């Protein structure tokens, strides 16, 4: 064996998946996402969601994959289905800042 050969790393080990709420839509398919632990990160749409033309709007619940080395950014990999016909449940509405919802 060669001495300078690198060991292959498993890329999946470095990623963690969270659920979050989209609080703000930004240009170029980027979003601000509030995670379950109240951390706000910058999320971008994965290629699979982009090619499937799945719309992600403010108030949607999403699964986001975060790299452990840079926890300020993540890739949105799935939009979770809504539990009821309302866009956002009341418990999740508390997480969205009032300036974004237009409500007092």
Image (cartoon, helix red, strand yellow):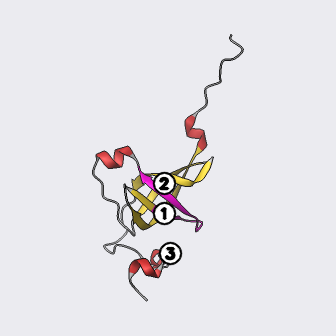
> Which residue is at a point 45% across and 77% down the rendered structure image?
93
Front label number (2 vs 1): 1
From the image, tell me which residue sits under label 1.
Answer: 33
> Which residue is at a point 47% across and 63% down the rendered structure image?
32
Is 21 inside the magenta-drawn segment?
A: no
Q: Earlier in the sequence, mark 3 or mark 2?
A: 2
> Which residue is at a point 42% across and 77% down the rendered structure image?
100
Is 44 inside the magenta-drawn segment?
A: yes
Q: Residues within 10 Å of mark 1 (few under 14, many from 20)?
A: many
Disc 3 and disc 2: Cα gap in Å? 17 Å
- x then y, percent, for residue 5: 66, 18
User: Could you tell me if the residues under marks 2 and 1 are in contact, i.e. CB atoms within 8 Å?
Assistant: yes
- What is the chief secondary structure element of the magenta stretch? strand
Tell me the quarter of the image containing the N terminus: top right
Which region is colored magenta?
32-45
In the depicted structure, whether residue 104 falls above or below residue 90: below
From the image, tell me which residue sits under label 3.
Answer: 95
Q: Earlier in the sequence, mark 3 or mark 1?
A: 1
Which mark, residue 64?
2
Secondary structure of the residue carrying numbered label 3: loop
Secondary structure of the residue carrying numbered label 1: strand
Tell me the quarter of the image containing the C terminus: bottom left
Left/right of residue 57 with respect to residue 21 in the rendered view: left
Disc 3 and disc 1: Cα gap in Å? 10 Å
């Amino acid at each position: 064996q060669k001495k300078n050969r690198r060991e292959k790393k498993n890329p999946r080990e470095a990623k963690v998946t969270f659920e979050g709420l989209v609080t703000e839509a930004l240009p170029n398919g980027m979003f601000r996402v509030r995670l379950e632990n109240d951390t706000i990160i910058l999320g971008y749409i994965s290629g699979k969601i982009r090619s499937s033309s799945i719309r992600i709007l403010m108030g949607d619940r999403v699964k986001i994959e975060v790299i452990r080395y840079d926890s300020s950014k993540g890739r949105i990999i799935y939009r979770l289905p809504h539990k009821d016909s309302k866009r956002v449940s009341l418990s999740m509405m508390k997480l969205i800042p009032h300036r974004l919802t237009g409500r007092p």
